[in-house]
Image (cartoon, helix red, strand yellow):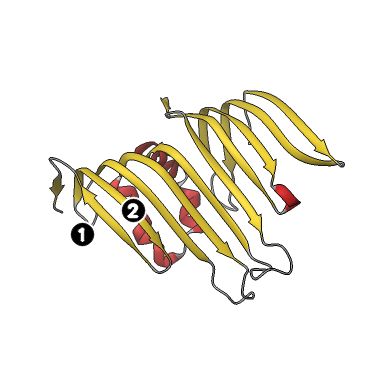
Amino acid sequence: LGSAGVRLEAWVRLEAGTVADALARLDLADLELTRTPPGLPPERMHLQALGAVLDWQRLAGGLGWRLDVRDLTLMHQGVAWPATELGLVWSTRPEGGLDEGGWELRGGLRLARLGQAMALVDAAAPTLSRLIPIDALSAFDRLLEARPDGALHDLAWRLTGGAGGASAAPTWAVRARIEQVTSAAAGAIPGVRGLDLDLAADQGGGRLTLSGAGVTFDLP
């Protein structure tokens, strides 16, 4: 991890000797992430700029925390991402309740471009291909081949677990809207242009609504 320039401004508020909340502005210039796997050449990812305002707060009762990331900006391969916001909330259940021992992690992202996110995925592909299970590598290759793009709006997700014993499976939920989806044909999956998607799903099932005007498909 290296950077040609770092600017950090931070404010911290303490209560009873512990951090109650913190606010920071972080800006990095020419950030380079480097990894050298044993016996393989170094793998690098370079970001021209990365910056954000980070607002961290402890939840009431000390049973979790909330992190809001505002004015998040990033430049990769000379392309600036649209400024966006994201949030994370981690909470645990108090002792003695029905969900004692349970936890929840939820988050959201206001706006992102899939094409720009895929450029990061493509740059990190050598590393990701060694972390992904072997039976999922084919799907990962098709994703890189398809090069999907579109405007992702209002992504929200939730993951919960811990309640009901260690053997209880976590539960999850996700929803998002993607406008003007485009992708190239990849394997047996056709390419598409101009499609809008509304997605809502959880561990029990989901709903995918397709819409759009002038949608075209490219059959492989």
Q: In the displayed image of the protein, which residue is found farthest to the front?
A: 97
Q: Which of marks 1 and 2 is nearer the N terminus?
A: 1
Q: In which quarter of the image is the C terminus?
A: bottom left
Mark 1–mark 2 Cα distance, whole angstroms, equals 23 Å
Task: Find residue 74 and report its horizontal and vertical position in percent.
Answer: 49, 30
Q: Residue at x 74, y 28 (%)?
A: 11
Q: Mark 2 points at which residue?
A: 199
> Can residue 128 be spotted in the picture?
yes
Q: In the displayed image of the protein, which residue is found farthest to the right?
A: 17
Circle on res. 188 = 1
Task: Find residue 127 and report its horizontal and vertical position in percent.
Answer: 50, 50
Task: Find residue 211 and report its horizontal and vertical position in percent.
Answer: 20, 47
Circle on res. 3 = none
> Can residue 185 be spotted in the picture?
no
Q: For this view, does 211 lie left or right of residue 160?
A: left
Using the image, determine if residue 105 lies above or below residue 80: below
